[in-house]
Amino acid sequence: MKKPLMISAAIVAAVAALMPLSANAQVWNLNIYGGWSYSNLSGKSTALSDGDYQSGFGGGLGAELRLNEDWGWEFGLWYVQKGTTGTLTGRAADPSFFPEPDETFTGNVNLDYLEIPILVNVYFPVGERADIRGYIGPTFAFLTRAKANGTLDGEAIDNDVRDLFDDADITVMIGAGGEWHLNRVDLLLDFRWDIGATNTSNVPETELRTSTVLITAGVGFPLYRDEE
């Protein structure tokens, strides 16, 4: 387990231990997010790490439990498009990866994930009707699609490359955003960084990690409030 994931897990565990001592109110919200993802792949020993960032969709649902004015949790179910784009030339050191040696690929490698983030939220009230919130926690991601779209040595291709990637990934999600409380709904605006903590490559002697920026807007619907 790499250092970012260990730090994230330690923070989550420490806050979880302290939360029951300070919880004096509970508010459940159902949050709906949608927006823009900006993703790339990094690593070593593979041509795919030479690509550029590409844009896609990121969004989903979040069950937000606010324990008091300062702390809370959010458990989510997200769909996030990741990958890389550009002109990639295979390397002799990577005979089993894509593109193969002496091949040139121009286009997109698209990786779609279903993600389950478990986040600790920290709230900073701004007046009576708004908060700034920060969050951090691990995300468990499951690959649903892997496609290479573009041209390979001048010929159009639309190849399934799922066998080159692991079916599961673990990332660390950190971010911050604003929360505006209206009469019946909350308006949300968030900036998140989804940092790959595990090697997502299935090819021996290669390493790839995802790196994704998410900018989303959303609405939150209060479902339950219990104030002591």
Image: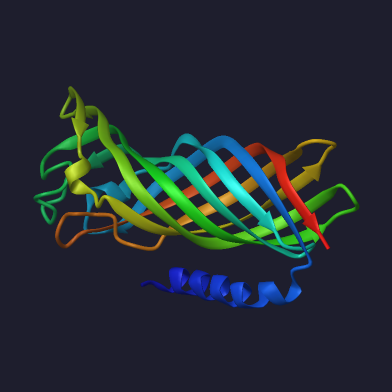
Identity of the residue furthest to the top in this view: 156
Looking at the picture, how far across and down is residue 101, in whole percent?
A: 11, 45
Q: Nearer the viewer, residue 157 or 76?
A: 76
User: Is residue 28 placed above or below 183 in the rendered structure?
Assistant: below
Looking at the picture, how far across and down is residue 170, in whole percent?
A: 38, 59
Which picture quadrant has residue 125?
bottom right
Q: Say left or right for 109 vs 25.
A: left
The residue located at (20%, 34%) in the rendering is 160
Looking at the picture, how far across and down is residue 130, in whole percent?
A: 83, 48
Q: Nearer the viewer, residue 74 or 196?
A: 74
The residue located at (56%, 70%) in the rendering is 12
Q: Say left or right for 223 vs 92.
A: right
The residue located at (73%, 43%) in the rendering is 222
User: Is residue 130 placed above or below 17 in the rendered structure?
Assistant: above
Identity of the residue furthest to the right in this view: 127
Quadrant where the N terminus lies?
Answer: bottom left
The colour scheme used to paint the residues is rainbow
Looking at the picture, how far across and down is residue 70, in whole percent?
A: 76, 65
Q: Nearer the viewer, residue 185 or 21?
A: 21
Quadrant where the C terminus lies?
Answer: bottom right
Which picture quadrant has residue 22?
bottom right
Which picture quadrant has residue 140?
bottom left
- Count of marks overlaid on the render: 0
The residue located at (14%, 60%) in the rendering is 204
User: Is residue 157 placed above or below 213 in the rendered structure?
Assistant: above
Q: Say left or right for 83 vs 44.
A: right
